[in-house]
Image: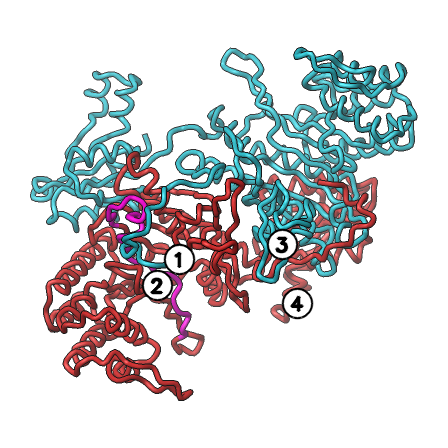
Chain colours: A cyan, B red
């Protein structure tokens, strides 16, 4: 690094982060870290091993793009290594897992179950709430084709949401399997690839458009409010009717067993029956693990990543109500499913895998918005020991050390300003209290402690002046030996 | 993502991570995370705010290089954003802090004290133990020119090392200030820039070469064992003598006050006196915080980053002894100091700052090598519930859920193999125990529990067969209701 002071003639750079790359501090960062710690506890109790893969992968291993020009494709951040190979920053945690599993397949204890968290990067146009670096937190099982492995993903997500602080009843896991839809199309002879995709896309819009919209998209087509016409799948009426029954099989409140019963009434096919049998086994494993119908339900309308998932699919949805009891749509905070092809890219052998990924930022935002798990509360700063004169420095540091030894976050003011600015600093740091050890206090073996929490409460009108005067004065001078005790009383209040 | 199964004609990529980018799992990863968590506790108790800046910075803000060619300089990973601006991955956590502080200077509570951890990237030739992505963990105070802010960095490091599990006496912080050396050179009229740098470089080699080597480098020059000649600084004999006194001022075991006294005997200069006064204040603050002479000592031979630091400099060194009591040189596990120019790159105004950075990988390796803080012990896997028949699945999952509810990591085997392979799997997962709920056990309301820890202990010859038989049998069949109790006994043993 060159000494900046020497760069007399260099223009000053503008201090700013690249577009779409946020700095994070305070409550947002603390909330995300609390969430990851809560999920880590659950994952490891389920026997999932932590894994940390690097930010870079070779572009061909990532699989999303193969640069054949000088400039890499959109979507990922890529650069050429000094041996001219393209490397790219990971855009999710699943592609690196597939590379890792394929690379170490011979020596891994199988099935291989790992959890991971970390940054992922997307080279997309940034926008409000749309970042180019964000955090994911995933659990995956590679090497098990048992539906129980899918059930475990659901149980993991249910417990993870609870550990994160989402109250009972405010989250639901929705489960389906692609085999149900495949079987339905099989039974109705829908084999044309384009027609199949249009059908799946129509079903995927059930939540948003309701049955009337989906019906149009399954038939001739749909004219939306803006006047745009979307061509439909052109299915026969019999197929449309069966899809209606299928989508309505999962009315809110039905038990998993009741949904299975309703689905069994539809037109049979080998694939559908396989799907029903998978769901039956998922239900049994969930029930054995104590996951209730309210926590995890079957919902055939769940489709997800059309070309990615090959079996079970899941989605975590928050279903909170506002202060008036009205349902609040907080939306999906995670999802996953069975993907049996990713490792095969490397090995040529189909390797069954299933996983679940939390949308860490979305879930953190929801926890804060709902003030669940103490999230959203103003974070608390350290107790600030004022630095009022040079002679007292040793005493200020001794007081801070004493507070820290008692487990209280504390610091000595280290700037050069006077009393008023120091009080303002303490307030901006959200200090619960300031400690004043002026010359008078030191001479008389005393200490003055000012309760800033109380000051803020008064300012917010939470308390009133009488209470303040009678019950807990904002400032008190006590013998120095009572420092920790009095500050503890304020911090714990 | 395209469906890999469709890529019939695409060649299979080789599954490997880019050179110099390690995958991390098991004990290494757990050790690093434990270390960061321990440091986080200390930093926040000292009132340092967490900050997370993105991986990318604009290249001009990073400051290390300004690409004027198509291909960026060595040293950093850089790429051009879609608006043609160069972005680079951060190579440390200090440059992004300087950018953040400059960008938010008006609104920050000052002094601004933050801690951070995260990956940094260096585009260097990888080699054994030399990675291109690694973790740093830093604390910095921006906006305080008080020597007490430097003292706080030292106290933070001392407490951090203790919290990380380094036992008392096994770590020492070495402290100096560049003002001592600047003053010494000032007093001896060493003003030529090249001569100054050669002098500093020579002093920096005191630890490695001893006085004889440094003396040659300060004089005419030094011929090393390989026959290479390094030209010396060509100092006059009086200056060389004073530097000898200076370097010897910090004999092992001297108190901070004694070192200050010895240094005060040297040739005076305004800068040196300023340095001595800074160290005096650092000593007082350290003493007030309970940091002993054994934990942090003054050592004028500490130089560090020649063109970077402007005042105090610190280095954390581990000084363990091996089983025979011989000193083990584990080397530096962190360092830092005062750098007053980094923010000025952006603002044009000199902004005092001081910081300390832990070498996270080095410290993790040392903790594991010394088996400090439980590091280096084999990590423990989950209890494995064997999956012996399809009918028992619900019982297997219920047993695993029961164990997890009691806080015991547990999983059901989810592969498709038989009993023998399942036992091998459990062993490779380092399971403390396996739970067997076969048809017989289920019919009779019992459960069989096999103690794998004991099996491993026997295999390692730690226990003997008689003890095994009489005191704790490796396998026991007990009523199903005693599952948690028995497994707890094994896990806690």
Q: Quadrant of residue A422?
A: top left
| Contact? badges 1 and 4 (CB < 8 Å) | no
Residue on which disc 3 sits: A86
Judging from the image, what secondary structure is the residue with disc 2 in? strand
Dots 2 and 3 on the same chain: no
Distance between mark 2 and mark 3 Cα atoms? 39 Å
Residue placed under numbered mark 2 in the picture: B316
Q: Chain of mark 3?
A: A
Task: Tell me the CA gap for discs 1 and 4.
Answer: 40 Å
Q: Tag 1: Cα neighbours inside 10 Å, few (<14), some, or many (≥20)?
A: many
Disc 1 vs disc 2: Cβ atoms closer than 8 Å? yes
Disc 1 or disc 4, which is closer to the eye? 1
Q: Are marks 4 and 2 in contact (CB under 8 Å)?
A: no
Distance from Cα at disc 4 to Cα at disc 2: 41 Å
Residue B408 appears in the rendering: no
**Mark 1 or 4 closer to N-term?**
1
Report which residue position mark 1 lands on: B358
Taking the spot 26% from the left edge, 36% from the top edge, the residue there is A487
Q: Are marks 1 and 2 on the same chain?
A: yes
Q: Is residue A256 above or below residue B145?
A: above
Q: Quadrant of the C terminus of chain B?
A: bottom right
Left or right: residue A75 versus residue A20 is right
Of all chains, the one bearing label 4 is B
Q: Quadrant of the N terminus of chain B?
A: top right
Q: Residues within 10 Å of mark 3 (few under 14, many from 20)?
A: some
Where residue B322 sits, quadrant-wise, is bottom left
Q: Which residue is mark 4?
A: B458
Read off the magenta span.
Answer: B328-352
């Amino acid at each position: 690094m060159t000494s900046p002071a020497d760069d007399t003639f260099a223009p000053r750079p503008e201090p700013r982060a690249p577009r779409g790359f946020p700095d994070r501090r305070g409550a947002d960062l603390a909330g995300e870290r609390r969430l990851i710690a809560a999920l880590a506890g659950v994952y490891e109790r389920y026997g999932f091993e932590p894994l940390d893969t690097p930010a870079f992968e070779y572009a061909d291993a990532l699989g999303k793009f193969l640069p054949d020009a000088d400039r890499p494709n959109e979507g990922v951040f890529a650069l050429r290594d000094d041996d001219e190979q393209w490397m790219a920053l990971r855009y999710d945690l699943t592609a690196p897992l597939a590379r890792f599993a394929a690379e170490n397949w011979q020596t891994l204890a199988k099935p291989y179950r790992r959890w991971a968290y970390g940054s992922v990067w997307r080279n997309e146009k940034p926008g409000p709430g749309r970042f180019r670096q964000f955090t994911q937190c995933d659990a995956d099982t590679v090497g098990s084709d048992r539906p129980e492995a899918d059930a475990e993903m659901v149980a993991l997500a249910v417990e993870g949401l609870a550990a994160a602080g989402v109250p009972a009843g405010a989250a639901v896991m929705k489960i389906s399997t692609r085999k149900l839809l495949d079987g339905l199309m099989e039974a109705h002879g829908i084999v044309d690839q384009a027609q199949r995709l249009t059908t799946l896309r129509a079903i995927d819009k059930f939540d948003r458009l309701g049955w009337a919209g989906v019906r149009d998209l399954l038939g001739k087509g749909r004219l939306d409010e803006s006047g745009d016409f979307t061509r439909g799948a052109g299915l026969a009426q019999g197929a449309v009717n069966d899809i209606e029954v299928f989508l309505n099989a999962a009315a809110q409140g039905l038990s998993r067993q009741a949904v299975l019963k309703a689905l069994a009434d539809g037109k049979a096919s080998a694939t559908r029956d396989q799907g029903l049998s998978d769901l039956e086994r998922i239900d049994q494993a969930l029930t054995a693990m104590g996951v209730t119908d309210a926590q995890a339900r079957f919902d055939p309308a769940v489709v997800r990543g059309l070309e990615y998932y090959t079996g079970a699919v899941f989605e975590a949805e928050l279903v909170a109500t506002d202060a008036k009891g009205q349902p609040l749509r907080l939306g999906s905070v995670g999802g996953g499913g069975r993907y049996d092809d990713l490792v095969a890219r490397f090995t040529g052998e189909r390797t069954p895998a299933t996983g679940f990924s939390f949308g860490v930022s979305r879930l953190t935002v929801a926890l804060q918005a709902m003030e669940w798990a103490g999230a959203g509360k103003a974070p608390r700063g350290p107790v600030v020991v004022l630095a009022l004169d040079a002679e007292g420095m040793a005493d200020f540091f001794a007081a801070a050390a004493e507070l820290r030894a008692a487990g209280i976050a504390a610091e000595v003011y280290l700037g050069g300003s006077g009393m008023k600015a120091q009080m303002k600093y303490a307030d901006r740091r959200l200090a619960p209290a300031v400690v004043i050890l002026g010359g008078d206090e030191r001479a008389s073996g005393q200490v003055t402690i000012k309760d800033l929490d109380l000051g803020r409460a008064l300012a917010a009108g939470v308390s009133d002046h009488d209470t303040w005067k009678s019950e807990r004065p904002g400032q008190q001078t006590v013998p120095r030996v009572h420092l920790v005790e009095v500050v503890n009383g304020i911090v714990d209040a």
